[in-house]
Image (cartoon, helix red, strand yellow):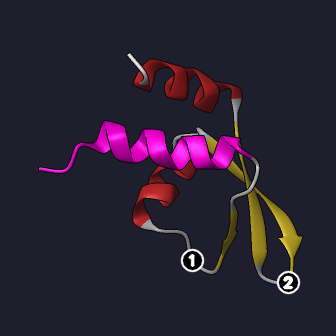
Amino acid sequence: MIDQRINHRCMLAEIVSGEDIQSGKPTSRLQTLLLIGFVTRQPHADNTFKLTLTDAGHRYLAGLWH
């Protein structure tokens, strides 16, 4: 079984690093995090988005380390 905590922690840590640019349709995992309000997308360039964590996303990420 896939440990979603590890998957989410890796994805959110990558986003918080500020280097994650997403293009095209988001993955189902990213779409879930967008829908529950942990991640936001800001237009960056042609058909690309810069991902950032919300305050709730930062709290969620902090909780995933324990």
Report crowding for label 2: few under 14, some 14 to 19, many 20 or more residues within 10 A (C-alpha).
few
At x 60%, y 39%, the residue is 37
Earlier residue among tags 2 and 1: 1
The amino acid beneath tag 2 is: Asp
Q: Secondary structure at mark 1?
A: loop
Task: State whether residue 44 is above or below residue 51.
Answer: below
Q: CA distance from mark 2 to mark 1?
A: 13 Å
Task: State whether residue 38 is above or below residue 48.
Answer: above
At x 51%, y 26%, the residue is 60
Report crowding for label 1: few under 14, some 14 to 19, many 20 or more residues within 10 A (C-alpha).
few
Side of 27 relative to 23 (left or right): left
Task: State whether residue 45 is above or below residue 58.
Answer: below
Magenta stretch in the rendered image: 1-17
Quadrant housing residue 47: bottom right
Q: Main secondary structure of the magenta part?
A: helix
Check residue 65 for magenta coloring. Answer: no
At x 47%, y 68%, the residue is 27
- Tell me whether circle 2 and circle 1 mark residues in contact (CB < 8 Å): no
Picture disc at residue 46: 2
Q: Where, quadrant-wise, is the C terminus in this rendering?
A: top left
- Observer-nearest of 18 and 30: 18
At x 63%, y 81%, the residue is 24
The amino acid beneath tag 1 is: Lys
Check residue 11 for magenta coloring. Answer: yes
- Observer-nearest of 39 and 1: 1
Q: Which residue is mark 1?
A: 25
Q: Secondary structure at mark 2?
A: loop
